[in-house]
Image (cartoon, rainbow, N blue to C red):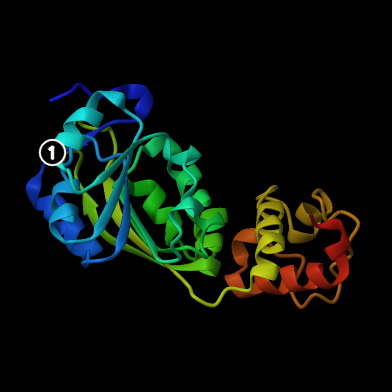
Amino acid sequence: MVQPIKRFGQNFLLDKNIIKKIAEVIDPKPGEKIIEIGPGQGALTDLLAESGAEVIAVEIDKRVIEFLSESYPNVEIINQDFLEFDLKKLNSNELRVVGNIPYNITSQIIFKLIENHQIVRDFVFMVQYEVAKRMIAKKGTKDYGILAVLLGYFANAELCFKVSPNVFYPKPKVFSAVVRIDFKKKIDDSLSKIFIRIVKAAFGNRRKTLKNSLSNSIFAQLNFRGCGVDLTLRAEQLDVEDFIKLAEFARKHFSDHIK
């Protein structure tokens, strides 16, 4: 076994029962195009490759590339940082993305997939349990924020099961969870960009009212009176439909300012 590298956020999953449970959540089928992020030494790759799916493993750690290439001749191994990998060059609009991903870049990976939602069907990840709770949080709770709202708009999110630190080497200091995110098919892409900006602006000053938060953002020149949302509320008190109303109002009255 190669030794985990801290800067890559590596914690190798050792428990075969957990690996099997993750594979069951993914439920890979022959012919599907599946990208595995950070296969490491192939714990999950093994089961993916057996399914008959077309597996593309993106691994940043050069030390395991030769091992993966020799062990899984039917898997395309790419030695690259996933954050720099161009998903569009795979020429598919039904990509599936899976992996025990580095916890230190979880949000960046998820935001990358949201940006590519037109070509990604779903993703199944092992993430830090606290992040998983933020992904499925409901309005009015302390975990509710940008991540929950964006996923609520673009996808359906499910926390599948919680995972103990004891099944990893080295043991992380936190619990983990497996999540499944299925992207919605009908997304108003002309609204998406402004929706994201509205959400980020609204949560930019979490303790302030919506009116104050928006007035301290790129929307400062726009009067949201008549938008159909109570501007005295805070962002955490709004549901996805409220943010859609704000985005539609901004698109109608402020579209020239949005690039």
Viewer-proximal residue, 171 or 50?
A: 50
- For the point 43% across and 54% down, the residue is 90
Image point (68%, 60%), residue name? 193
**Front in this rendered view, residue 35 or 77:** 77
Residue 64, horizontal then vertical, whole percent: 23, 28
Q: Is residue 206 left or right of residue 158?
A: right
- Residue 190 horizontal side relative to residue 143, left or right: right
Q: Position of residue 82 (x, y in %)?
A: 42, 40
Residue sitting farthest toward the left: 16
The relative height of residue 106 versus residue 158 in the rendered view (above or below) is: above
Q: Give the number of marks.
A: 1
Q: Give the image location of residue 203, x and y in percent.
A: 65, 52
Please say whether residue 170 is visible from this viewpoint: no
Residue 249 lies left or right of residue 123; in this view the side is right
User: Regarding mark 1 in the picture, which secondary structure is present there?
Assistant: helix
Label 1 crowd bin: few (<14), some (14–19), many (20+), radius 10 Å: some
In the image, what residue occupies the spot 17% across and 31% down?
A: 67
Q: Is residue 246 above or below residue 5?
A: below
Question: 193 or 34: which is nearer to us?
Answer: 34
Question: Looking at the picture, does residue 61 appear above or below residue 84?
Answer: above
In the rendered image, which residue does mark 1 sit on?
71
x, y (%) of residue 132? 37, 53
The answer to whether residue 114 is left or right of residue 63 is right
Image quarter hosting the C terminus: bottom right
Residue 19 seen anywhere in this rendered image of the structure = yes
Report the quarter where the N terminus lies.
top left
Position above or below: 203 against 168: below
Amino acid type of the residue that numbered disc 1 sits on in the rendered structure: Ser
